[in-house]
Image (cartoon, rainbow, N blue to C red):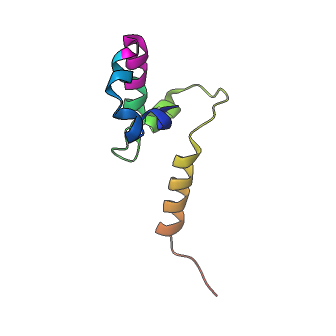
Amino acid sequence: VYAGLSMTCIRRLKTLWTAIPAKVVALYDEMEALYNPTKNHLNYQNALDARPRAPTIPCFVFYLKWLFAIEEANATVSE
């Protein structure tokens, strides 16, 4: 939902955003703060760590990014 709403073509629709209730805009602002990319999505990581160990569906894109970074940062051992 956040990815769709944060697209540039949607963000430019000023009349649409003025028609959205303030409660929904506040929820969108919370999501925007959560998915803020600064410090490698630190807000998102902290939110996942703060949750109890209940079943959670994390954002898969971040895990792929982190796994790729781990793979590229570590040298491979060749024989």
Tell me what residue is drawn at x 33 percent, y 34 percent: 12
Viewed as shown, does residue 12 lie left or right of 5?
left
Tell me what residue is drawn at x 56 percent, y 54 percent: 64
Q: Where is the C terminus found, in terms of image quarters?
A: bottom right
Viewed as shown, does residue 30 lie left or right of 79?
left
Residue reaching furthest right?
A: 55
Q: Position of residue 7 (x, y in %)?
A: 42, 40
Q: Position of residue 22 (x, y in %)?
A: 37, 12
Q: Is residue 40 above or below residue 30?
A: below
| Numbered circles on residues, count | 0
Tell me what residue is drawn at x 43 percent, y 19 percent: 27
Q: Position of residue 44 (x, y in %)?
A: 45, 36
* Residue 25, quarter of the rendered image: top left
Q: Position of residue 16 (x, y in %)?
A: 39, 22
Q: Is residue 53 above or below residue 73?
A: above
Magenta residues (range): 19-29
Q: Is residue 7 above or below residue 66?
A: above
* Residue 36, quarter of the rendered image: top left
Q: Is residue 70 above or below residue 62?
A: below
Residue reaching furthest bottom?
A: 79
Please, what is the dominant secondary structure of the magenta stretch?
helix
* Residue 30, quarter of the rendered image: top left
Q: Nearer the viewer, residue 40 or 75?
A: 40
Q: Nearer the viewer, residue 55 or 79?
A: 55
Let me know if residue 34 is in the magenta part: no
